[in-house]
């Protein structure tokens, strides 16, 4: 409950004689006024900084070849200097404001990217993208701790995941460990914010990447598939983390972790369903794929055990269905290894369609529009995807579409009958 | 802990401005005081999302013998430079460039494709397209891309 709402409620309780004035003061003292700013302010500050930073990068990428070198360098240092001034002002005057800390953090990180890029461009530095990203993320790292901001951490970890894929394990490990204390402190403080989940998702991806590097010959990797494996495993690791916190820590900070994990699993399904010719068949010697398949399978199994050992869900809950989907997806990836010419898109389509139907059914049962729309969206996606699928004959597509249409109409009819029955 | 917070912040800001500042100083010093070398090149036109358009450069003499980070530079009778060899150890008595790579020449997004086109239109018998590089103490900075002594920016503008 927000502090303002709580205040109003407490005043009402006092007016109605439920609590005394003394009790009112004691309750209010538990929720001190903070100057951290509302989430909307923080979001606006971060989005504003991202837009300014991205705009600066784009303007500089235009390459103002007519400008003399000193002017180019002045322009390169201008946003960085402004970012430093904003950072200094935040530290000295507005450190208690989360909006200021977040905005200056994001601005500093993007200004670093812009400055290094323009210096490189001015002198035609041939360094590769990974070297450039690594240099920039290393410069943003101290800012995470000094400004205590999620935004700069998000930029760092995204860059670190990218750079980590390009460098050997020790470097990737160091990049992974560097922001860990910041995130652990956030979790221990029971902060619940979606950005924290994003950070943990990226960290999971980074960790999975390190595991793959440790146990796998990188040259044997089929990287197009590996991205799906990494995303799926990272999402499952996040869900597992969420379950572990709930089970042992009684901490529910990672509620948004569930959303991110779920979103990523669906993203994998959506990509898998659309994937066709650009996914090569994995080579026979790709031992790595076995590991990458077993990893999500094990994670999912542990997740299901942990999440449902002490909770007996009534019927099939949304999370249970997601666990089943996770499991099926991991099995599909395993099948890709075992069966020749087993393409990922066929089972992904079926799974995604099943999820869509499940959500529609859940939405109609609970009369929850959110679930209903989500389910409809998934089913519509499959329909659009397969409508333009030249691999399936027009006749088969036509019959399938008619059958599905009839199915939906029947569902609609049954639901409306049920609603009428309830109303009467 | 609080005692160190402000100095740490000041140090961070110094590093933030200092690292790009050092890069600038180093590159500018080489550009203004380094010895100039001309390398014959064949450009084409890719894209970098952060740093914009650049002309990628194929440099035939990069297939020189040997391996290692140090490129030994030499000039031919026409005054054009080439890599004589690559070696593992730092040379004492010859001009060299460490981790020598002149594969990128950043250009305006509208001009870069024109340079690639220009490259296909020139007469390879008579015209010379080359990159001029300033070299000093193993460091190097690209000064410009030229066709017969004229900067390509002027030709394609």
Image: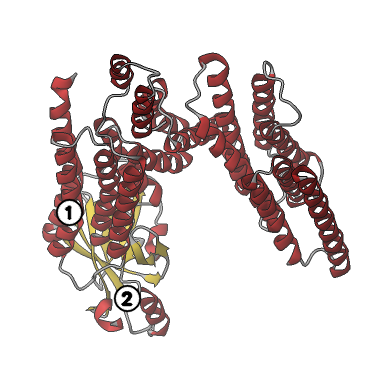
Residue visible at 39% across and 59% down?
B49
Disc 1 to disc 2, C-alpha distance: 33 Å
Q: According to the image, label 1 marks what residue?
A: A77
Q: Quadrant of the C terminus of chain A?
A: top right
Residue visible at 31% across and 38% down?
A138
Chain ID for label 2?
Answer: B
Residue A181's image quarter? top left
Q: According to the image, label 2 marks what residue?
A: B129
Local secondary structure at mark 1? helix
Count of numbered circles in the view: 2
**Colour scheme in the image?**
secondary structure
Q: Nearer the viewer, residue A14 or A294?
A: A14
In x, y percent, where is residue B148? 26, 80
A91 sits left or right of B130 in the view = left
Residue visible at 39% across and 24% down?
A16
A361 sits left or right of A216 in the view = right
Residue A137 in the image: above or below residue A392: above
């Amino acid at each position: 409950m927000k502090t303002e709402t709580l205040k109003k409620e407490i005043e009402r309780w006092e007016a109605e004689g439920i609590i005394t004035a003394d009790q009112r003061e004691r309750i209010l003292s538990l929720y001190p006024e903070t100057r951290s700013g509302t989430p909307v302010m923080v979001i606006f500050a971060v989005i504003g900084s991202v837009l300014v930073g991205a705009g600066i990068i784009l303007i500089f990428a235009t390459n103002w070849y007519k400008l003399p070198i000193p002017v180019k360098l002045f322009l390169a240092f201008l946003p960085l200097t402004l970012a430093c001034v904003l950072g200094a002002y935040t530290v000295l005057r507005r450190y208690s404001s989360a909006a200021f800390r977040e905005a200056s953090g994001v601005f500093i990180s993007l200004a670093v990217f812009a400055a290094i890029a323009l210096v490189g461009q001015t002198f035609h530095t041939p360094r590769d993208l990974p070297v450039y990203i690594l240099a920039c993320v290393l410069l943003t790292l101290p800012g995470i701790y000094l400004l205590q901001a999620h935004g700069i951490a998000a930029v760092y970890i995204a860059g670190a995941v990218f750079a980590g894929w390009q460098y050997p394990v020790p470097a990737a490990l160091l990049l992974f460990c560097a922001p860990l204390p910041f995130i652990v402190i956030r979790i221990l403080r029971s902060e619940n914010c979606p950005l924290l989940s994003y950070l943990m998702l990226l960290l999971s991806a980074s960790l999975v990447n390190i595991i793959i590097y440790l146990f796998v010959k990188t040259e044997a990797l089929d990287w197009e598939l590996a991205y799906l494996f990494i995303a799926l495993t990272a999402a499952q690791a996040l869900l597992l983390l969420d379950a572990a916190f709930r089970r042992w820590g009684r901490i529910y900070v990672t509620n948004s972790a569930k959303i991110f994990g779920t979103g990523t699993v669906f993203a994998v399904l959506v990509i898998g369903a659309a994937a066709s010719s650009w996914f090569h068949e994995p080579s026979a010697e790709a031992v790595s794929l076995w590991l990458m398949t077993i990893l999500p399978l094990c994670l999912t199994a542990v997740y299901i055990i942990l999440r449902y050992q002490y909770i007996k869900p009534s019927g099939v809950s949304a999370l249970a269905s997601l666990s089943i989907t996770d499991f099926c997806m991991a099995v599909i990836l395993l099948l890709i290894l075992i069966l020749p010419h087993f393409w990922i898109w066929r089972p992904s389509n079926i799974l995604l369609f099943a999820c869509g139907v499940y959500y529609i059914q859940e939405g109609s049962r609970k009369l929850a529009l959110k679930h209903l729309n989500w389910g409809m969206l998934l089913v519509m996606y499959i329909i659009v995807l397969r409508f333009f699928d030249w691999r399936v004959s027009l006749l088969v597509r036509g019959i399938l579409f008619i059958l599905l249409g009839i199915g939906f109409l029947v569902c609609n009819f049954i639901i409306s009958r049920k609603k009428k029955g309830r109303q009467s | 802990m609080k005692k160190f917070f402000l100095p740490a912040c000041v140090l961070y800001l110094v590093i933030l401005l200092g690292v790009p500042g050092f890069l600038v100083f180093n590159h500018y010093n080489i550009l203004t005081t380094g010895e100039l070398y001309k390398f014959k090149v064949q450009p084409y036109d890719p894209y970098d999302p952060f740093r914009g358009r650049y002309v990628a450069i194929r440099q035939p003499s990069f297939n020189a013998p040997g391996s290692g980070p140090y490129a030994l530079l030499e000039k031919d009778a026409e005054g054009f430079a080439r890599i004589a060899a690559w070696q593992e150890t730092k040379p004492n008595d010859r001009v060299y460039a460490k981790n020598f790579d002149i594969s990128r020449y950043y250009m305006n997004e509208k001009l870069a494709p024109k340079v690639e086109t220009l490259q296909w239109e020139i007469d390879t018998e008579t015209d010379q397209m080359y990159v001029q590089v300033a070299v000093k103490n193993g460091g190097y900075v690209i000064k410009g891309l030229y066709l017969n002594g004229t900067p390509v920016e002027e030709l394609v503008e």
